[in-house]
Image (tube, helix red, strand yellow):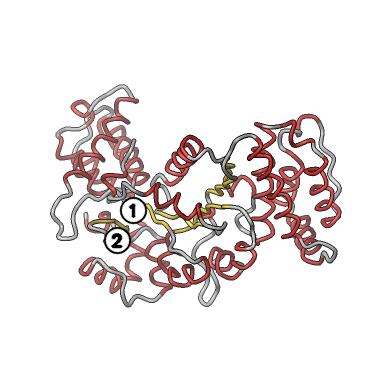
Amino acid sequence: MDCLRERGVTALFQHLRLPLADPPRPLLFSGHIGDGKTTLLQQLRGQLEREEHDFVAFGEADERLDLSDIEYDDVLLSILAIVDQSLRQRYQEAMEADAIQRFWHELSRMANLPIQLDKAELSLGPFGKLTTIIRDSPDARLQVRQRLREAREATFLSVVNGYLHEAQQIVRRYGHRQLVVILDNLDRLPGIQGAGQVFPDERLLLGQATQLLGVQCHVIYAVRLALVRAQGANLMDRYGHQSLVVPMIPVHHPDNTPHEAGMVKLQEIVQRRLQAAGTDIAQAFSDTAQMERLCRASSGHLRTLMTLMRSACAEARAAHTALPLTAADIDMAIRNIGAQSRIVAADYAGALQTIATTHRLDGLPAEVRYAVFHHHLVYEYFADGNYWYDTSRLLVE
């Protein structure tokens, strides 16, 4: 479902496309985990392919990488694997050229990890096979990193860019404007660390930004909103543009009056899900006020909305075995789903009160900003050209 109008960002795709017209620089794309970023990135992929005639290679970081232990080398290898596999799926004959093969031979020599492909793995490609090995073997991962960084005759980055240059030539021969890579799910890197430790995504995207900026291809990374709101100025310094953020579907305005368009959209989403399950609103809820309360309690966060629905159904099944969902069922769902948030919120009570009152993040330390977004205690919305913030309705309800 198209929710961009209700989110207040109808021009979001245009903002995503604009940086791709400049010399290649990584583009950071963010939003709350579980609120439809992957769907939007797939929609962007379709638009770029249809309207701009780009060749878009799409991949998910958690399929290619061990997110508990990730360095820039792993990210660059995953980019190679995503591009290589995408090209093999569409233009297999071009991938057999000597110009392409020599980059693999150079990389395998540098890594000193000879890999033989059987017929079943041809579509995966040699780079895909290598990323699978280093994802599943910590020892191989460390070995490959060390050898790639110690290479002298040709640097790892030069091999990556050489391959990407050849890939650009291939896609242009087939009528595409340019190559674009989308690496989704980097926002799933481990979050909160111990006191004084650097977050993994901060170490990768800030500490190793130089290596990521060296990639001579348009790459869109899906990154954690907590990092963007904690380190936004530093990220802009490094990457030369603001991170693009997908705001939530609002359930109310900053003055706490109901946001009618947002609530209507959320109720439509619930209705679609009920139809898929073979029922409707009249059968599923004891009255429409209960459905509205469920939508409001979700704060407009789609995964929370679906989780609340499932929890309310479980409560109903235990209490009275059949629909409709009652006020008591929804009460219990809100209590259960919000329980952990309320425990964590106690550590940030002052900051949460400030955000609930001002709807801004001004004056809050970076580590507090990171924590309240990481724990889904605060959500982000957009109205009248500005982002604004509010505490989770699970805390309020």
Residue 87 marker:
none
Residue at x-position 14% and y-position 60%: 255
Count how many numbered circles sit on residues in the image.
2
Q: Where does the image place residue 214, in percent across and percent down from the top left?
A: 64, 62
Pointer 1: residues within 10 angstroms few (<14), some, or many (20+)? Answer: many
Location of the C terminus by quadrant is bottom left
Q: Which mark is residue 247?
A: 1
Three-letter amino acid code at the position of disc 2: Tyr
Q: Position of residue 290 (x, y in %)?
A: 18, 39
Label 2 close to label 1 by CB (< 8 Å): yes
**Disc 2, SS:** strand
* SS label for mark 1: loop
Q: Nearer the viewer, residue 26 or 251?
A: 26
- Name which of mark 2 and mark 1 comes first in the sequence: 1
Left or right side of 142 for 168: left
Amino acid type of the residue that numbered disc 1 sits on in the rendered structure: Pro
Other-residue count near label 2 (Cα within 10 Å), few / some / many at <14 / 14–19 / ≥20: some
Residue 89 placed where, x, y %? 66, 32
Q: Point out the image quarter for the N terminus.
A: top left
Residue at 47% over, 36% down: 46
Q: Residue at the spot x=76%, y=33% of the render?
A: 122
Residue 6 percent across, percent down from the top left: 26, 45
Residue bearing the label numbered 2: 387
